[in-house]
Amino acid sequence: MTNRDNCPTCLPSDAPFDYINTPGAKAARDAGLANLAELPEGGKGIVERISETDHDLEHLVRIGQNPAFIKGLEVAVLAKSPNNGPVIIQVGKDLYDVCNDVASVVWVKPV
């Protein structure tokens, strides 16, 4: 993994979320949010926050096989694999196979 100090995608000015001050799961649930892993098949949500500070996970949600999970992005859960397997989501016309670890920290407001 790239060193954070040399990583162009990890510049504080470019970060879409304030990871340090993001409330945890209880606060998210109290605010009526659910994570992508919890949404049922056919459920939709608007991305509100990512409650994770791990650098590698930040990379996973910002680059690679996943969409750039930015606040306000609408996502739809098309299918869920059993036993905490990947979640298939749709963003616009694009489909993504999101691992459960990433899906569980992307908090959305169900619509």
Image (cartoon, helix red, strand yellow):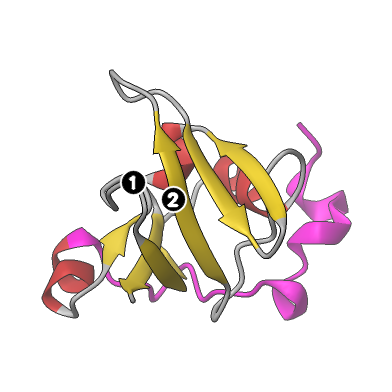
Left or right: where 7 falls relative to 63:
right
Which residue type does callout 2 highlight?
Val
Q: Is residue 56 visible?
A: no
Residue bounds of the magenta highlight: 1-25
In this view of the protein, which residue sits in the foreground, 78 or 58? 78
Left or right: where 74 falls relative to 15:
left
Quadrant placement of the C terminus: bottom left
Circle 2 is placed at which residue position? 77
Q: Position of residue 68 (x, y in %)?
A: 69, 60
Q: Position of residue 7 (x, y in %)?
A: 84, 52
User: Under tag 2, what secondary structure?
Assistant: strand
| Rendered image: mark on residue 41 | 1
For the residues labelled 2 and 1, say whether their Cβ atoms are less than 8 Å apart.
yes
Q: Position of residue 13 (x, y in %)?
A: 75, 80
Q: Is residue 95 above or below residue 1?
A: below
Q: Is residue 82 above or below residue 37?
A: above
* Prevailing secondary structure of the magenta residues: loop
Which residue type does callout 1 highlight?
Glu
Q: Is residue 66 above or below residue 43?
A: above
Quadrant placement of the N terminus: top right
Question: What whole-number distance in Å separates the C-alpha atoms at marks 2 and 1?
Answer: 5 Å
Precedes in sequence: disc 2 or disc 1: 1
Furthest-top residue in view? 83
| Rendered image: mark on residue 52 | none
Q: Quadrant of residue 26?
A: bottom left
